[in-house]
Image: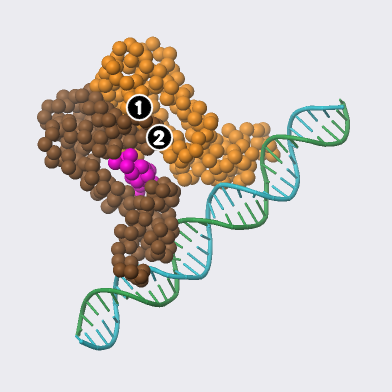
Chain colours: A brown, B orange, C green, D cyan
Amino acid sequence: MSAPAYHHGDLRAALLDAALALLETGGVAALSLRAVARAAGVSAMAPYHHFKDRAALVAAVAAAGYDRLYAEKLAALAAAPDDPIARLVAGARNYVGFVIDNPALYRLMASPELAGRPHADLAKSAAAPAASLAALVAAARAAGQLGDAEPAAVALQLWAFAHGLGQLAIDGHAPGADVPALAESGAQALLRGLG
Amino acid sequence: MSAPAYHHGDLRAALLDAALALLETGGVAALSLRAVARAAGVSAMAPYHHFKDRAALVAAVAAAGYDRLYAEKLAALAAAPDDPIARLVAGARNYVGFVIDNPALYRLMASPELAGRPHADLAKSAAAPAASLAALVAAARAAGQLGDAEPAAVALQLWAFAHGLGQLAIDGHAPGADVPALAESGAQALLRGLG
DNA sequence: TGTACATCAGTGAACGCGCGTTCACTGATGTAC
DNA sequence: TGTACATCAGTGAACGCGCGTTCACTGATGTAC
């Protein structure tokens, strides 16, 4: 609780925190095992007791990102009282808000570096947001609010819009715009046009 | 014309070609000066006669990407006889097609690596697609096809949709989908809903 | 037409760097008896 | 309660790698006279 103990206590969590901080500072390129260890005040080898290799660390950071995205921005919508379309629109706004608040983390989550070979924990974490989107689209469809549009297609199109808008925003292509408002009006328009 | 000459002839173009090939093979990470030189069959130092440093090479590759995107996919739409909405929809389809055909190149073009400090040639090349989108939106607006929607917002929302759909597709999130068709129907719906 | 010479476009060796990862180790902790 | 010992979580030195970039160089080309 004072002098640095030999055993850290919760080094895994500390490494993930350090990785997140490095990520937002220097992007994915800054996410080296050595830098993370350094930032956590631990020897270069210590992370190997918690992560098989660099790829495992990167995947764990991304998985934590999906967990936060779902918990902070999407989970509440599943049980909200509003009608499905309104919840989808709110979801788009929230999603874009997450991207803007965590640019480097989101870029990592969407990075092709992870698309390579599959990582079990990551796949599980990434599935929650996708499932909540699919459920809302299905609910809207069941309520007759989407005409006869194909649910999987609607979900993909809505996701694409939110994903793209968030990326453009964090890449500096929407200077001065009220991006969350554009997320809402765009999602609304897309759903209306598809229905 | 036969034995490798001391003077290459057009090493700059050869280096850009080699860079493109490396990019599609191994992603941005594979785009090192040494690897490019190696692929072009030239010493590690030769590229420095054509590019100030690695960043300049990367920017030149991206600029070439924007040039191709505009020339192959967008330029013809400016003068096409169809009404503006139809041309915007076709532009979205073409844009997504480009992304799918050139995944690594597109990722580089959209990469934050380039957003850092500005590169004159790159900015010029990137401006052409943006300008053609803006012009089509303005034409649609003038033709009364977009109600009183704000043109800059419509352009950004449409771009976001195409950008996001392309990215999701190349990241493997649209397996089995007819992505260009989704680009069309989504753009159509978005524009209809916004107008 | 010939020659001198500046310039251009390449070479090749070398540097220092941060990286991922290996190896053999050691101190701290927990558990069986 | 005490002790033996397995296991866990850390250390620190060392490796080999590809990289960007520097330096001093050299062969090929083009131009002035």
Residue at 34%, 12% in the rendered image: B142
Residue C9: x, y in percent? 67, 37
Q: Are marks 2 and 1 on the same chain?
A: no
Q: Secondary structure at mark 1?
A: helix
Residue B157: x, y in percent? 32, 27
B46 sits left or right of B138 in the view: right
Q: Which mark is residue B52?
A: none
D13 sits left or right of B99 in the view: right
Residue A107 sits inside the magenta stretch: yes
Residue at 32%, 42% in the rendered image: A101
Q: Which span is picked out in magenta? A: A98-117
Please tell me whether the stretch drawn in magenta is mainly helix, strand or loop.
helix
Residue at 40%, 13% in the rendered image: B80
Residue type beneath disc 1: Leu
Q: Which residue is mark 2?
A: A172
Chain letter of the residue carrying label 2: A
Task: Assign the N terminus of chain B to one quadrant of the image.
Answer: top right
Q: CA distance from mark 2 to mark 1?
A: 12 Å
Residue A19: x, y in percent? 37, 54
B10 sits left or right of B19 in the view: right
Q: Which residue is mark 1?
A: B156
- Asked whether residue A73 appears in the rendered view, the answer is yes
Q: Secondary structure at mark 2?
A: loop
